[in-house]
Amino acid sequence: MAKRPAPEINAGSMADIAFLLLIFFLVTTTMDVDTGITRILPPPVKNKNENVDVKERNVLKVLINSHDLMLVNGKPANVDNLTEKVVDFMSLHPNNKAYPEVQAKYIPELGKKVLMSKGIVSLKNDRGTSYQMYIKVQDAIAKAFNILKDQQSLKYYGVKYKELVDPKKIKTINKLVPIRVSEAEPENVGGGD
């Protein structure tokens, strides 16, 4: 009996199939993107012995203990209301001594003096504060400053801050609403383990 030769498998389309699989994985795979808190850190202190005098009324103190409970200026508060509190505190209240001082600052891009708050948000965490709570508080504070930037952008340019494309206008709004957040080194202050 004569043996028949085994039929050859046509491998001509294997490269096409491999290419399609590669495209499929590239389209369906999600890449991890670095996330984090976008915050510009202040420059290093030149003179460590220098005593910076900040008036008590200019500081909004936010404390978080190891049980993720929050105090804002010594009173219990909820992270859901923190954005409103920061916006209210950092907004201009020129003749109200319960709010931060206001100073007139010349903004060259606008060609005039503009009233600005001297307020600072001071954030202090316990070492036992959960990461989720820390991020929630950071998000609430960032959201508050974004609202303030939107207000100024709408006032001077008629569009929200994120819609600005001119770098000079973006720089001007950043001058009008500087992100003044002071974050202290975490401590064991809130009944941690």
Image: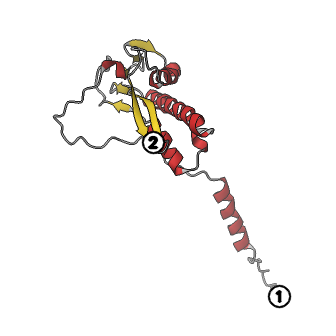
Give the quarter of the figure containing the N terminus: bottom right
Locate the C terminus and report the quarter of the image it occupies: top left
Under mark 2, the amino acid is Thr
Residue 23 shows in this picture? yes
How packed mark 1 is, by other alpha carbons closer than 10 Å (few <14, some 14-19, many 20 or more), is few
Looking at numbered disc 1 in the image, what kind of residue is underneath it?
A: Ala
Tell me, yes or no, if residue 35 can be seen here: no
The answer to whether residue 125 is above or below residue 16 is above
Residue drawn at the location 44% of the way across and 44% of the way down? 108
Q: In terms of image quadrants, where is residue 11?
A: bottom right
| Residue named by callout 1 | 2
Residue 125 % position (x, y): 35, 26
Circle 1 sits in a helix, a strand or a loop, which is it?
Answer: loop
Where 165 sits versus 62, above or below? below
Provide residue 37's location: percent of width, then percent of height.
45, 40
- Give the mark, 1 or 2, whose residue is nearer the N terminus: 1
SS assignment at label 2: loop
Q: Nearer the viewer, residue 101 or 61?
A: 101
Residue tagged by mark 2?
A: 38
Query: Where residue 35 sits: x, y (%)?
Result: 49, 44
The quadrant where residue 117 appears: top left
Instruction: Give residue 54's position: percent from left, percent from top.
Output: 29, 25
Farthest-out residue, right: 1
In the foreground, 74 or 116: 116
* Residue lying at the far top of the rendered structure: 75
